[in-house]
Amino acid sequence: MTELEVAMEYLRSFCAGAIRGIEPLLASDLRFSGTLFEYHSAKEYLDDLKKDPPEKCGYQVLSITENEDSVTVF
């Protein structure tokens, strides 16, 4: 999968509330730091999602920016 395909599959799975769809997309050494949470592994992130799973929701992609190192989806 390309980075863009991974990002879009993550978005689809998250918005569908499908944690099992997210799991294979994450690197085990995932590092995530946001306004409310900070994670130091995929397991830590997935454990939190399992405790409080995302609800199904719709989404609209407004723009996509990508380069060799990253993909940003708004």
Image: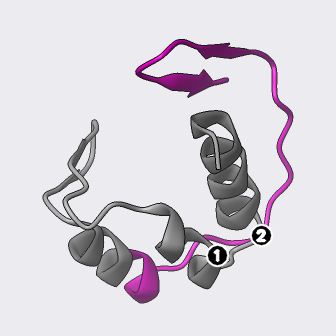
Q: Residues within 10 Å of mark 1 (few under 14, many from 20)?
A: some
Q: Quadrant of residue 22?
A: bottom right
> Residue 31 placed where, x, y %?
20, 49
Q: Which residue is mark 1?
A: 21
Coloring scheme used: one colour
Q: Is residue 59 above or below residue 43?
A: above
Residue at image x 31%, y 68%? 45
Q: Is residue 20 above or below residue 23?
A: below
Quarter that holds the C terminus: top right
Q: Is residue 62 above or below residue 15?
A: above
> Residue 24 placed where, x, y %?
51, 73
Q: Which disc is residue 73 wearing?
A: none
Question: In the displayed structure, does residue 39 sit left or right of residue 68?
Answer: left
Magenta segment range?
49-74
Is 46 covered by the magenta stretch?
A: no
Question: In the displayed structure, does residue 2 sit left or right of residue 37?
Answer: right
Task: Give the camera-side residue of 23 and 19.
Answer: 23
Residue at image x 33%, y 77%? 48
**Amino acid under label 2?**
Ala
Q: Residues within 10 Å of mark 2 (few under 14, many from 20)?
A: some
> Residue 60 placed where, x, y %?
86, 34
Is 67 covered by the magenta stretch?
A: yes
**Amino acid under label 1?**
Gly
Q: How many marks?
A: 2
Q: Which residue is mark 2?
A: 16
Q: Earlier in the sequence, mark 1 or mark 2?
A: 2
